[in-house]
């Protein structure tokens, strides 16, 4: 990578308050997008086995339904390759608008699909196709939003500002859960006939909201400067693999921490409401809602701490703490004690796991230079997230035909957390590195970008 000439044409100075606008746009967009993404998870655990699959074998229907949840994660690496390329070539803002509209339309389409009773095997095929489109959209959403906020953020506060993307993701989970609580309380004949469609049909609003929120968002000063000086990578993937392949692999391994989210959100819900455990569906949805509400407060606090003491120690608290608390939470489900379940669920997912969620948006983004940041984050995270998405199916297998082996599922999840912790521990600390010097690898020179002025929020 060549340095940007000092006399190259540059965009106008960054106006005061742009970091705030970028963070708010990332938060709102992520909340809307991940509302769409996670209502599918609730439906896959509670409704889809009865609606889109043969009623002759309920256990197999549940297994396949949970497998369709992972299909989106399988599509995400492909989406990362495509959207990462265009995001580093054309800019972060265009990808942010595109991904949100695609998610809204594909989720709305799920609410319009015919059931297995109506069209047979065509129903699950169409369901999987819509889930693939959701995965392609999600692949570019977090990476583009994280790149946008990181490149707008003032020095010394990148962790805090980038945490708004994950904070929005948690808000989306809350919206998805709250939307399903009244739906899950419907009589089964109404739930399985028309009730489940309502949260998906509401996604029509997402496409409109996405356009309104993000269409006027300004591009980052670092990307504008690179574009003005013709320093945008023609083939970001080639640059990424030449200079940053080790960091891509590190992000893949660290991103496996998302297994905690899929196990808690999907497998844990399915296990808790199964015939073996028999907990109330609405109560368990409230566990998720309250845990995510706690995360809304915890994520920015952990992110602020990472700006003070570093990304690595905060991430390790989340990874290692989750490895321990997954045993406590799944054990609490087996006891059937609602007070214990609520307490451990909020502590585990809402507080401790949020340490990883609060620190990784900056931690991963700071590994890469402006030329390949969106590609590096998208490809690395989406491969890791793809594996994490199918962790639900692995857990269902580990649990056995009767779904009783929660201890095995906890051990599997803890092992994945340890892999993530090792990956993070071997990375370099970047919280004090100036934005212009981030991601500089052998054979590259630093991005010659003037830092944005500080702004508060």
Image (cartoon, grey):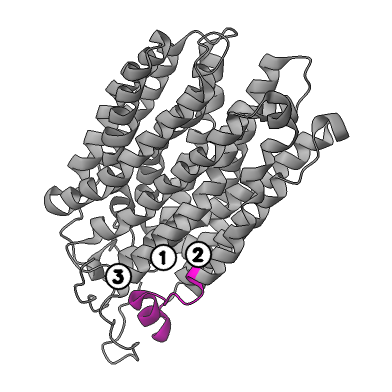
Classify mark 1: residues with Cα within 10 Å, few (<14), some (14-19) or many (20+): many
Q: CA distance from mark 3 to mark 1?
A: 10 Å
Q: Nearer the viewer, residue 207 or 304?
A: 207
Q: Along the horizontal axis of the image, is 308 left or right of 440? A: left
Q: Residue, x 67% and y 15% (percent of image)?
A: 59
Q: Earlier in the sequence, mark 3 or mark 1?
A: 3
Q: Residue furthest left?
A: 309
The tally of labels here is 3
Magenta stretch bounds: 213-231
Q: Which residue has dot 3 on it? A: 19
Residue 217 belongs to the span the image colors magenta: yes
Judge whether 369 appears above or below 165 on screen: below
Image quadrant containing the N terminus: bottom left
Query: Which residue is nearer to you in this view: 442 or 43?
Result: 43
Find residue 180 and report its horizontal and vertical position in percent: 56, 37
Q: Relative to residue 395, is residue 123 drawn left or right?
A: right
- Residue located 67% across and 25% down the image: 187
Give the labeled residue for mark 1.
25
Q: Earlier in the sequence, mark 3 or mark 2?
A: 3
Helix, strand or loop status at disc 1: helix
- 135 part of magenta stretch: no
Residue identifier under label 2: 96
Q: Are marks 3 and 1 in contact (CB under 8 Å)?
A: no
């Amino acid at each position: 990578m060549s340095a940007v000439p000092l006399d190259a044409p540059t965009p106008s100075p960054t106006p005061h308050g742009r970091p705030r606008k970028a963070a708010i746009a990332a938060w709102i967009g992520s909340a809307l997008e991940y509302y769409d993404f996670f209502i599918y998870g609730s439906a896959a655990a509670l409704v889809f086995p009865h609606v889109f699959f043969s009623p002759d074998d309920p256990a197999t229907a549940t297994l396949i339904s949970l497998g369709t949840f992972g299909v989106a994660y399988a599509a995400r690496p492909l989406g990362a390759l495509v959207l990462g390329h265009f995001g580093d070539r054309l800019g972060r803002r265009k990808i942010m608008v595109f991904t949100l509209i695609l998610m809204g339309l594909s989720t709305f389409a799920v609410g319009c699909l015919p059931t297995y009773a109506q069209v047979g095997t065509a129903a699950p095929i169409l369901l999987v196709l819509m889930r693939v489109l959701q995965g392609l959209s999600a692949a570019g959403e977090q990476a583009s939003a994280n790149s946008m906020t990181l490149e707008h953020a003032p020095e010394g506060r990148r962790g805090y500002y980038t945490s708004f993307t994950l904070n929005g993701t948690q808000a989306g989970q809350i919206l998805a859960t709250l939307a399903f609580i009244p739906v899950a309380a419907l009589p089964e004949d109404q739930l399985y006939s028309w009730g489940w469609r309502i949260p998906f049909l509401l996604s029509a609003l997402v496409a409109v909201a996405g356009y309104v929120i993000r269409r006027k968002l300004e591009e980052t000063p670092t990307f504008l400067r690179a574009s003005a000086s013709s320093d945008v990578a023609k083939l970001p993937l080639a640059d990424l693999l030449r200079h940053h392949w080790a960091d891509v692999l590190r992000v893949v391994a660290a991103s496996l921490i998302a297994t905690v989210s899929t196990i808690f959100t999907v497998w844990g819900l399915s296990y808790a409401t199964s015939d073996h455990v028999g907990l109330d569906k609405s109560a368990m949805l409230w566990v998720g809602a309250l845990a995510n509400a706690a995360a809304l407060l915890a994520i920015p606090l952990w992110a602020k701490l990472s700006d003070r003491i570093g990304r690595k120690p905060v991430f390790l608290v989340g990874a290692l703490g989750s490895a321990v608390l997954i045993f406590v939470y799944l054990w609490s489900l087996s006891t059937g004690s609602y007070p214990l379940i609520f307490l451990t669920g909020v502590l585990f997912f809402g507080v401790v796991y949020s340490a990883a969620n609060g620190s990784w948006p900056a931690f991963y983004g700071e590994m890469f230079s402006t030329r390949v940041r969106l590609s590096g984050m998208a490809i690395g995270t989406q491969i890791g997230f793809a594996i994490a998405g199918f962790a639900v199916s692995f857990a269902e297998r580990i649990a056995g035909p009767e779904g009783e082996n929660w201890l095995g599922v906890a051990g599997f999840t803890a092992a994945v957390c340890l892999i993530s912790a090792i990956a993070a521990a071997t990375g370099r600390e970047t919280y004090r590195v100036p934005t212009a010097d981030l991601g500089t690898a052998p054979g590259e020179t630093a991005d010659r970008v003037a830092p944005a002025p500080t702004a508060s929020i």
